[in-house]
Amino acid sequence: MGSSAADLAIRHWNATPLYISEEERYGFYPWLPEAAEFSGHRGERVLEIGCGTGCDLLQFAKHGAIATGVDITPTHLRLARQRVANLATVVEADGRSLPFPDGSFDYVYSHGVLHHSDEPRKIVEEIFRMLRPGGRFNVHVYALISYDTLWALLRHGRDWKLHIENSPDPVHIDLNTAGSLRNLFAPARLQITKHQCRPSELLAPWFGWFLVAKGQRP
């Protein structure tokens, strides 16, 4: 991330770390295990960029992946290491400049991270660099056109972005469309779906809060 966005993220999640149980997380995001492909990477080298407190990272490890997670927030790093114990590796690192050789991973995953960066293309370039030839990525970001966007705007007005995360402390947030993601990840070809619509998941393809972009290293 750029320095201002990174500093905001570190301050935000050091003060209010996002630590919830597996039951809570996948109860709130019932679509996530399938969308993230937790069970589909046994024996593969999986990297999670922005692993937070390690809940998703642990799922990859439980299903047999050789899982590594990176994060920039000290409190999240500590809690992630406690959660995953010896089942996965947790490394302090910035997604813009990762401390691994080219082609180190088969699969790169990131949920809810790129939209907090003011230099997302640098992270995308690192995703491409991390992947072996033929390796795949799976990135989840907030959608501009969504029920959650409208609900927050109507409820909180122009300060609505302060009410998206788990505290009102400021944090950088970008909203995306399928088109902006295709531009961001060019020249990779993306498969994009939408998920998480509060009134009904049946509406998620049109009004979902998360855009899920999957593709292969170009």
Image (cartoon, rainbow, N blue to C red):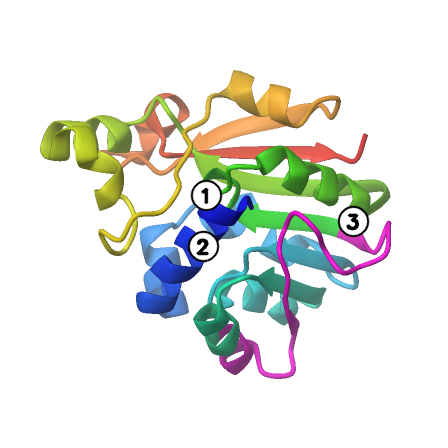
Question: In the rendered picture of this protein, how many numbered marks are placed on residues?
Answer: 3
Mark 2: secondary structure: helix
Of label 1 and label 2, which has the lower sequence position?
2
Question: Viewed as shown, does residue 6 lie left or right of 119?
Answer: left
The local crowd at label 2, few if under 14, some if 14 to 19, many if 20 or more residues have their Cα within 10 Å, is some
For residue 7, above or below residue 206: below
Q: In the current view of this chain or complex, which residue is farthest to the left?
A: 155
Mark 1: secondary structure: helix
The span picked out in magenta is 80-106
Question: Viewed as shown, does residue 210 lie left or right of 41?
Answer: left
Residue 7 numbered mark, or none: 2
Check disc 3 and report the residue beneath it.
130
- For the question of whether residue 133 can be seen, the reply is yes
Tell me whether circle 3 and circle 2 mark residues in contact (CB < 8 Å). Answer: no
Q: Amino acid at mark 1?
A: His
Tell me whether circle 3 and circle 1 mark residues in contact (CB < 8 Å). Answer: no
Q: For marks 3 and 1, give the one nearer the viewer.
A: 1
The quadrant holding residue 22 is bottom left
The quadrant holding residue 60 is bottom right
Q: In the current view of this chain or complex, which residue is farthest to the top?
A: 179
CA distance for labels 3 and 2:
24 Å
For residue 23, above or below residue 47: below
The local crowd at label 3, few if under 14, some if 14 to 19, many if 20 or more residues have their Cα within 10 Å, is many
The local crowd at label 1, few if under 14, some if 14 to 19, many if 20 or more residues have their Cα within 10 Å, is many
Query: Front-most of 54 and 196?
Result: 54
